[in-house]
Amino acid sequence: MTDTILSVSNLSTSFRTDRGWLKAIDGVSFTVHRGEILGLVGESGCGKSVTSQSIMRLYEEKRMVRYEGTVMLSGTDLLSLPFSRMQHIRGRDISMIFQDALSSLNPVLTVGDQIMEPLRIHQKMRGDAARAEALNMLRLVGIPAPETRLRQYPHELSGGMRQRVMIAIALACHPQLLIADEPTTALDVTIQAQIMDLIVFLNRQLAMGVILITHDLAVVAQTCQRVAVMYLGQIVEEGGVPDIFDRPLHPYTRGLLASIPRMDGDRRERLHVIDGTVPLLHQMPSGCRFAPRCPYATDHCRKEMPQLRSVSGGQSVRCWREEE
Amino acid sequence: MQSAFSTDTASLARIRKELVREQRRVNLRRFLHNKLSVVGFFIVFLMLLLAVFAPVITGALGVDPYTSLGREMRLQPPSAAHPFGTDNVNRDVFARVIYGARISMTVGFFVGLFSSLIGTAIGMYATINAVWDNILMRICDGLKAIPNILLAITLMAVLGANMHNVILSLTIVSVPGVARIARSQALLVREQTYIEAMRAAGASRFRIMWCHVLPNILSPIIVQMTFTFATAIISEASLSFLGAGIPIPAPSWGGMLKEARSYIYNGWWMVVFPAIFTGLSVLGFNLFGDGLRDLIDPLSGR
């Protein structure tokens, strides 16, 4: 468990817009160990996806982007690699699965062709060898009758099946790190559970690190060992799953946990809501970014930004209240 | 992972085959349902047959597009021996019309093929490189600004009149249209998540373009190809009619019409038959293309 695969430190990603450079994430740091699932949670627009896409450097071809900090994958800094070398790392050392499996699969290619694609690219596998490996992958992700599925097109598969195929594609080259960007959002609850079980199973089986991006805290509680909570492009709290769920330190984390409806609670009681909305990137508060919505905010909070500091038991938090 | 509901591979394969066959039946029925596109298909098919078997057909009738049949056979009206009559220099019009299909189809085919290949390559390349995108698309705009036939005539005047140059100049005229379609389709496909997923899988730009974007933009390009085919036939006829196309004595439909112009009062058959064949084949390709387009995208063109 101490074997570190990925260590992100001080990662900031800015995009060039009409209003100048906007920092979408600011000083994000975390590590992922071998065989570990790290949950990355936060509400929409807090920078979860930007973080994952920055690790993969997927923005470069599309728009003007600037990265700062380091992303160390087993001793190499991905951000300083030339673009062509980065291409060899994607799909071989780090893979990614996306939210909507249907739109993430090419409609005009067969499932088999798409699973063989990373094998062809990275391992120069051809013909029967690639086909055999694709079959293996389909079996590994638990698809029945893989020989038939290999020749089918994505539209012929069900939603859960498609997500399994996506996972097979992502894992074809046995990457050290898998980034799962809300892999179950587009699926119904029973299939969701199956896919999460599969991810946990493969995580143990292949001893890879997994970053699970989600806004579903229940999923995190069931699958992850550690969790990082993001708010407005920063990590506000990080630690082991039991610690954070038992003893959330940051007011935002507390708010998130309090917003989960409980089966044993009073049904008539209204759900807890965190007041206010996420500010826009160009109207960032100058002190603590959560201060405008925080019930405990003081003048100090509004003036000066707190740093992420470790507290007891490997938990760290970005809040002034914990300093005192 | 085997559950009670999963069927064995063999029966799944059988079900799948059934489904594929069913889908083909549905597609075929949809195509046949549109009577006009079937008519178009048969015209196209017939023209291609005529073009390929021109020597066989004329040989069977014992006629030839080039040889003079003697002074007494000048401007003879249609008869059993010469179904389309004879022309002002004593040649069999039927043989010339059939051989004319050869020229038209050859020009149409190669212009369609080359302009699709070049246009697709240009259109797709434009989506990779923003600088070249601007340069290539402005050149296309420039070419499109000049009326097609005028541009073709100019090119023919520069290049010299022969069949190769007709194909070359009509290809140059047709490329911008295909390039625009390829570019716009590629831009659409490029933004899809599956392309992003392929990038995340480590595919190079070239591989993404060739293996993942191209198959997705192929169908509109194929439809465009049938229209380019039709346009090329009529453009070739126009060029030859104006004397800038395939030089006489080659039996090009346009060239035949040009000659027939002077004999319109005493040899109407010289005008009518090449004109019918030109019109018919252009109509055929257009109807066929419409049918194909409806098949690929049932919502368009309604």
Image (tube, coloured by chain):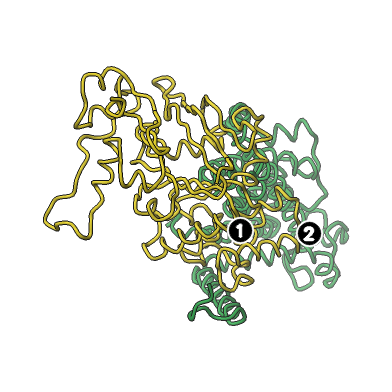
Chain colours: A yellow, B green
Q: Residues within 10 Å of mark 2 (few under 14, many from 20)?
A: many
Q: Is residue A301 visible?
A: yes
Say which residue label 2 marks: B99
> Which residue in the rendered view is the most extreme toward the left?
A268
Amino acid at pointer 2: Tyr
Looking at the image, residue B40 lies above or below residue B231: below
Tag 1 subunit: A
The alpha-carbon separation of the residues under discs 2 and 1 comes to 42 Å
Please tell me whether mark 1 sits on a helix, a strand or a loop. Answer: loop
Query: Which is more foreground, mark 2 or mark 1?
Result: 1
Looking at the image, residue B51 lies above or below residue A315: below
Say which residue label 1 marks: A109
How many marks overall? 2
Q: Residues within 10 Å of mark 1 (few under 14, many from 20)?
A: some
Q: Residue B170 location in percent, x, y? A: 69, 42
Amino acid at pointer 1: Leu
Assign the C terminus of chain B to one quadrant of the image. Answer: bottom left
Q: Is residue B233 left or right of residue B192?
A: right
Looking at the image, residue A319 lies above or below residue B65: above
- Label for residue A128? none
Please tell me whether mark 2 sits on a helix, a strand or a loop. Answer: helix
